[in-house]
Image (spheres, grey):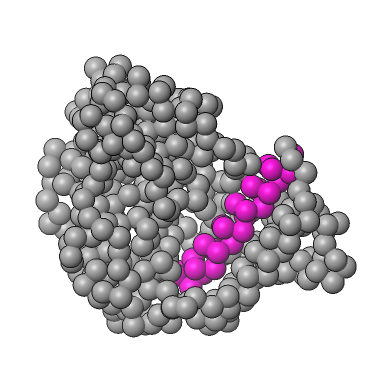
Amino acid sequence: MNELNFQPGPTDLAAGVTRSRTHVLSGVTDPSTESAEHGLLHSSVARQGGRLPATAVDEAALFPLLQNAYGFGRWRSWRRTDKGSSNISWFVQTDAGEMVLRRSHNLKTVAGARFEFALLEHLRGHGYPAPPIQRTRDGGIYFQAQGVLHMVMGLLPGSAYDPGDPAQLEAAARGLARYHSIVSELTPAGEPNRSSGLASLGQLGQENLYAAVNVVVPLLTPQAAAAVAEEARYLGERMEQLNVGLGQRQKELRSLVIHGSYGQSAVLVNGHQLTGVLDFDRSAYDLLALDLAYALRSFCREIPNRPSGPSLNTDRGRAFLRHYRSHAPLPDADFAALPEVFQAQRLIVVAKKCQNLLTKQAIVPRQSKDALSFSLLLKRECARVRWITHNPFPVKDDA
């Protein structure tokens, strides 16, 4: 998705949202250029896959550089966070208190970091519990070391989400609705581009799917290779159908700056209160329904989660939508699109995994274990997409 300029505009979500002065910031590292009145908020280039192979982090070399870059005094100790697959994060104890250090993946660009900073400042200006980005000694919002971007954020209060607590489900649903209400103030300065998520299911995504299959097939048994080829044909056909079908209806669907990964691991709670929302690095201008589908899949999934079969608990899904709608409306067109959006979301994951595999193949040839892992991924996602296709979204429009 190309970079878009955003300016404050009228909202049609949650009439009555309390407005402070709108913060629309440039996200540049020079503080003198950051004006809430005159800045611009840019959309980032959405992540499409292509992640490089993981490499070990030389903490002994990295942390002295970061300590010198930031004015927190000594970095006394640090420990890796338990979660995080695309980024690496640490809790860092400094002379100035505890911070969170995030080492971004190779797909994070300077434009993406600037956008994320501007978005977080906009949210915090409205009282939303987003993390504050800490600046370097020279006023920068990130520090580049070992070829990747690093950002330091203030620590937010709260504990991990409890999926068994209905009150926390309500807090999470209302938190997403409030987020959508706030970002609905940001309207694109020009004609919005096509959804980057849907675009990943187009010709390039389909070509990457078949190219990835061609990489792994020689490393599999004949029986496994035949199964992978058949699953790829089905997934490719569904990519094309959704790319065209949802693409033709895109103008009917609501688009805004989605969170991108609003799920259980992205929220912090204190009792029944939402105290923190994290993981904004996937935020980009896209379909609201993609954000809602991700959240429903995370907060309302069946436990245990089955490889095929219903992954969404109907009662929790209905409750989530009811609480969401108590703070923001859900347009009929977006609700009606959810069955297809659920399928599209699974296929977007497949498209990204294929591009990751091809990127890694160009650097380090894939081995049998990689081919087996990829074949299991296709089998699992094919079963899920088949089930979702033949069993429409189970939550009725009475939430």
Q: Is residue 82 above or below residue 237?
A: above
Q: Is residue 343 left or right of residue 378?
A: left
Residue depicted at x 32% and y 66%: 331
Q: Which residues are magenta?
A: 336-362
Residue depicted at x 69% and y 43%: 360
Please name whichever residue, 164 or 288, is drawn nearer the observer in this view of the structure.
Answer: 164
Mostly what secondary structure, the magenta segment? helix
Q: Is residue 112 magenta?
A: no
Q: Is residue 387 above or below residue 116?
A: below
Counting from the top left corner in percent of width and height, residue 146 is at 52, 26
Residue depicted at x 74% and y 57%: 369
Q: Quadrant of the C terminus?
A: bottom left
Q: Is residue 394 above or below residue 4?
A: below
Please name whichever residue, 56 or 394, is drawn nearer the observer in this view of the structure.
Answer: 56
Q: Quadrant of residue 290?
A: bottom left
Counting from the top left corner in percent of width and height, residue 313 is at 40, 80
Please name whichever residue, 185 or 59, is drawn nearer the observer in this view of the structure.
Answer: 59
Q: Is residue 344 magenta?
A: yes
